[in-house]
Amino acid sequence: MAYICYMQINIAKKVAAEQAATYIKSGMTLGLGTGSTAYYAIMRIGEMVREGLSVKAVATSEESEELARAQGIPIIPFSEVDRIHIDIDGADEANAALQLIKGGGGALLREKIIAAASDQMIVIADESKVVAQLGKFPLPVEIIPFAYELTLRRLHQLHAAPALRKKGDQYFVTDNGNYIADCHYERIADPETLHAQLNDIPGVVENGLFIGMAHLLIIGKEDGTTREIRR
Ligand SMILES: O=C(CO)[C@H](O)[C@H](O)COP(=O)(O)O
């Protein structure tokens, strides 16, 4: 799967991504996120590499890896990763405590593995992603295909109102060969508890709540300015 070319530039996403790129220094190993905001970060890093920046990177999805390679960003195997200095990724929702919902693009598992391995996770988003309480965006939960009906039943018991994500008339399959159950909570009062309850279900691989992972949130605005919130 390849990134579509974004014909209409989204200024808010672009400025957030470009501000995040100012934190990058030569010699760093980077984590590259997934989604339409991360797209702008990868494009900017590509430009910086062509201007002489020396970095290495790992990607959170096959599509981001493909885009990064096309932009000339050196992608290294995980066996060669010593440390990841900065991970730059988008979010579907973010609150003031820098708790996130991620996985709208279906890449939450790789995104979480890379965020957890990074010294610093920088989240880039437009203003519409900033919320007082998480949960309006359906929480993506990655589940294995085996006996998925039973896993969905367990999610129902957690009041998740899960819906298996579809792509056309097929179930959406992640880069890891799994399904995504989008869980409709509307309001998540206690993200830590829900995170633990979801990951406790056999068949759940990971959920899209990112708690205590983001260090910096860069919010881009339509007027071309940015605002930063640090944890
Ligand atoms: O978590 C993600 C992909 O799994 C994305 O970061 C999230 O969905 C935000 O995407 P976009 O920047 O396109 O709004």
Image: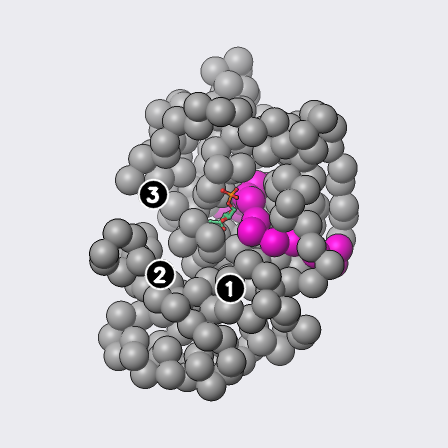
- Write the start and end of the magenta stretch as one range: 82-98
Q: Going by the image, does 116 lie left or right of 224? A: left
Q: Quadrant of the N terminus?
A: top left
Residue at horizontal 64 percent and vertical 45 percent from the top: 128
- Mark 2: few, some, or many residues within 10 Å (few <14, many ≥20)? some
Q: Is residue 221 above or below residue 180?
A: above
Q: Is residue 72 left or right of residue 100?
A: left
Is 68 situated left or right of 136 in this image?
left
Location of mark 3 (residue): 62
User: Cα distance, mark 2 to mark 3?
Assistant: 19 Å
Residue picked out by circle 2: 165
Residue 18 position, x and y percent, is 62, 27
The earlier-in-sequence mark between 2 and 3 is 3
Nearest to the observer: residue 161 or residue 70: 161
Amino acid type, callout 1:
Leu
Q: Position of residue 171 (x, y in %)?
A: 27, 60
Q: Is residue 91 above or below residue 162?
A: above
C-beta proximity under 8 Å, tags 2 and 3: no
Amino acid type assigned to the residue bearing label 2 in the image? Arg
